């Protein structure tokens, strides 16, 4: 992979997609993880000051916000923090849930990325920006994202890059080591990490997607995830009236 050329092409593609759709720039969530860091720096290169990083803590780890703010500062990315803790808590109460409800319950945890999606689209509308996604090919291929949450975006600049390719691009962009060395996590609950939740490693998933040999049990896990996430990959099916 020629990383410098790839970086230039992604930035050009981003500008084409945003400007041709009537947008003036890009807004994205900055989580403190590698994918959003890469997207943030790409957006800064593509749009200069016409981009906005939103740091959206929702009962999140303090370290994640520190890393996100440090990255925005280092790369001079326009940034804003919107605290969603109280909104999340109030929504749980409206649902009849207690604040002490098990945080590992996905039906509740997925509210967090959906609140973030609403916030991103609010700012996109106010600023005439487009929402730029942070999903990579590895995650998208197995549906490892929240439907209408972090999957609710306008454009996916790194959506055709395997996780290992995201790391390669990150090193070229000089993303700090404190982000490169972190365990990938969606931050849905304390101690959550992607590989444990998926039951496979990104290295295994990338090998499978490249057509290389992986353990049979791993391959079956990947195929199962792909089957069960098909509904996330497309627009909702529409019933066709006959006659």
Image (cartoon, grey):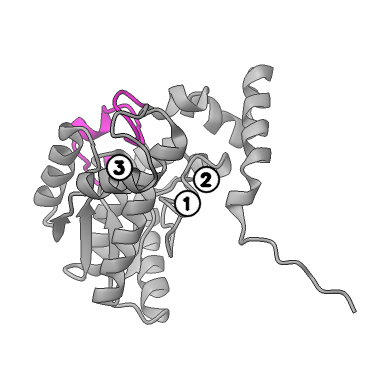
- Residue nearest the observer in this picture, 119 or 50: 119
Q: Quadrant of residue 121?
A: bottom left
Give the residue number, with chain letter if any, for mark 2: 140
Crowd band around label 2 with a 10 angstrom C-alpha radius: few (<14), some (14–19), many (20+): some
Q: Which residues are magenta?
A: 171-192
Q: Secondary structure at mark 2?
A: helix
Q: Secondary structure at mark 1?
A: loop
Q: Are marks 1 and 2 in contact (CB under 8 Å)?
A: yes
Res. 210 visible in picture: no
Cα separation between marks 2 and 3: 19 Å
Residue 170 — which label? Answer: 3
Residue 173 coordinates in the image, percent (x, y): 25, 47
Crowd band around label 3 with a 10 angstrom C-alpha radius: few (<14), some (14–19), many (20+): many
Q: Secondary structure at mark 3?
A: helix
Give the residue number, with chain letter if any, for mark 1: 159
Cα separation between marks 1 and 3: 14 Å
Q: Is residue 162 above or below residue 17?
A: above
Q: Nearer the viewer, mark 1 or mark 2?
A: 2
């Amino acid at each position: 992979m020629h990383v410098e050329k790839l970086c230039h092409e992604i930035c050009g593609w981003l500008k084409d997609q945003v400007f041709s759709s009537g947008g003036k720039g890009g807004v994205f969530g900055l989580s403190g993880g590698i994918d959003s860091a890469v997207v943030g720096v790409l957006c800064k290169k593509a749009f200069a000051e016409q981009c906005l990083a939103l740091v959206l803590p929702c009962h999140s780890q303090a370290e994640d916000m520190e890393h996100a703010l440090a990255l925005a500062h280092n790369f001079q990315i326009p940034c804003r923090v919107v605290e969603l803790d109280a909104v999340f808590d109030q929504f749980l109460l409206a649902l009849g849930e207690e604040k002490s409800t098990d945080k590992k319950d996905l039906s509740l945890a997925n509210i967090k990325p959906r609140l973030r999606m609403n916030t991103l689209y609010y700012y996109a509308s106010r600023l005439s920006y487009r929402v730029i996604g942070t999903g990579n090919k590895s995650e998208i291929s197995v549906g490892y994202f929240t439907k209408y949450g972090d999957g609710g975006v306008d454009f996916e600049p790194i959506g055709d890059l395997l996780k290992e390719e995201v790391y390669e691009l990150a090193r070229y962009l000089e993303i700090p080591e404190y982000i490169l060395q972190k365990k990938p996590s969606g931050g849905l609950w304390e101690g959550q990490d992607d590989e444990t939740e998926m039951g496979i490693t990104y290295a295994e998933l990338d090998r499978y997607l490249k057509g290389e040999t992986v353990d049979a049990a791993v391959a079956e896990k990947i195929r199962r995830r792909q089957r069960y996430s098909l509904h996330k990959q497309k627009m909702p099916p529409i019933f066709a009236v006959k006659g």
